[in-house]
Image (cartoon, grey):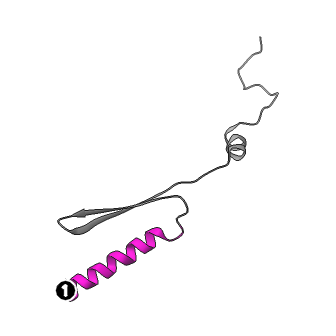
Amino acid sequence: MTLSEEDRESLDDVIERVLRALDGLEYGSVNITVHDAKVTQIDRTEKYRFTPAASRKASAPERSNRQHPGMTGG
């Protein structure tokens, strides 16, 4: 298969964009959408992984003995 100069430049651009999407990606995906044999879209989805201990600490609010204003005990 022989590529025209324009197709070659387009292919080089797509490859560069895919490499940029992959750069620094630890967990996630890069999705390449093709229509009529041409790349039309590149999506990068990045996921962040947390250890169970770290996510419990991050999501659990600090407990306090103070009551919310307007709240009464009882």
Q: Which residue is mark 1?
A: 2
Q: Which residue lies at the image location 67% right of the left edge and 48% below the top edge?
A: 51
Residue at 18%, 87% in the rendered image: 4
Residue 4 falls inside the magenta stretch: yes
Q: Is residue 31 left or right of residue 69?
A: left
Q: Is 16 covered by the magenta stretch?
A: yes
Depth check: give the residue in front, 73 or 47: 47
**Residue occupying the point 39% across, 78% down:** 16
Residue 51 placement, left or right of 34? right
Report the span colored magenta.
1-24
- What amino acid is labelled 1 in the image? Thr
What residue lies at 38% left-to-right and 73% top-to-bottom? 17
- State whether residue 54 is above or below residue 22: above
Expressed as whole percent of the image width and height from the top left, the position of residue 2 reads: 19, 86
Q: Residues within 10 Å of mark 1 (few under 14, many from 20)?
A: few
Q: Quadrant of residue 29?
A: bottom left
- Rendered view: 10 above or below 5: above
